[in-house]
Amino acid sequence: MIGWIGLGHIGRAMAERLSEEYELLVWNRSIEKARGFKNVAKTPEEVAEKCYVIFLSLYDSEAVRQVSERLLKADLSWKIVVDPTTNHHEKVLEFHEMYRNVGAFYLESPVIGSVIPARNGQLTILVSGEREAFEKVRPYLEKLGKKIFHFEEPGKATKLKLINNFVLGAFMAALGEAVALGEKAGIPKEELIEVLENGAGNSVVLKAKKEKLLGDDYSTHFSVKNLVKDLSYAYELAVASRKAVPLNAAVRELYRVAFERDMEELDFSVVYKLLREL
């Protein structure tokens, strides 16, 4: 049985996908989010005791730390913790050490993609950690992802994910501002998006968010709240690397405005609505 902790938007999508082929024991802090799963644990400690492989899909590194402290109450010798959470680049190194010290394997495994790719097994998965553990969980990861990168260097996967999500946020902001500008200039949104997808705007981001832009549908696949967290982590990576990132600062501030306008739980494509209203 595989353990799964964390049933947010993408966590639930991944767990549902994995449960099509494997038996899962799930736990979530808000137990109502576990509805629909056959095996629901009462505590994280129960998951640690009963499962050899444990997935964590949590909001941030503080949540990972809190859950990990509870998992460590069980005997984790030779067990494997797979962590798809987007973590802080320094905290994730602490998690590697924390689990190594008790004889367990820790694989940071942030994913690129949101709810729909997760449901369809089309994620890109970045993994850092020991190859022995990676090979043991590869079949599970292949159920979730179409492309898997493995790096033995701890922390590398997390750095790559933070940089990727900076590009994601910046690209969505550019698309949102372009569409808002076009509409103000008298160009119908449908025409503008069609030109963009056949020109400079052609991208995975536009393909994924086209229908949301056309239909003003901001139901959550990846929330503003999560993106603001990831952009902040990316900025702290830049500070630690002594690298100026002026675009990151501008993009992060834009999404923070969306956050402050009570859009934090909406899909990050809502930045278009914000830019249209400004």
Image (spheres, helix red, strand yellow):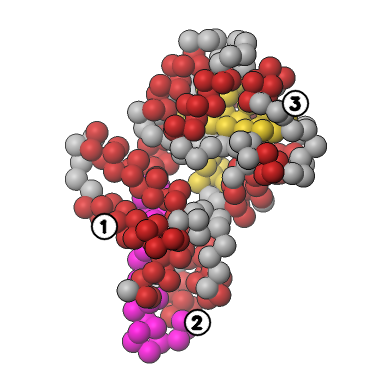
Q: Amino acid at mark 1?
A: Ala
Q: Secondary structure at mark 3?
A: loop
* Residue 23 on the magenta segment: no
Task: Categorize mark 1 by other alpha carbons within 10 Å: few (<14), some (14-19), many (20+).
Answer: few
Q: Amino acid at mark 2?
A: Glu
The disc placed on residue 250 is 1
* Residue drawn at the location 44% of the way across and 32% of the way down: 62
The disc placed on residue 1 is 3
Q: Position of residue 152 (x, y in %)?
A: 45, 24
The disc placed on residue 62 is none
User: Mark 2 and mark 1 in contact (Cβ < 8 Å)?
Assistant: no
- Could you tell me how far apart the alpha carbons at marks 1 and 2 are, in whole angstroms? 28 Å
Labels 3 and 1: the sequence-earlier one: 3
Q: Which residue is mark 2?
A: 190
Q: Position of residue 223 (x, y in %)?
A: 49, 54
> What segment is highlighted magenta in the picture?
163-191
- Could you tell me how far apart the alpha carbons at marks 3 and 2 are, in whole angstroms? 48 Å
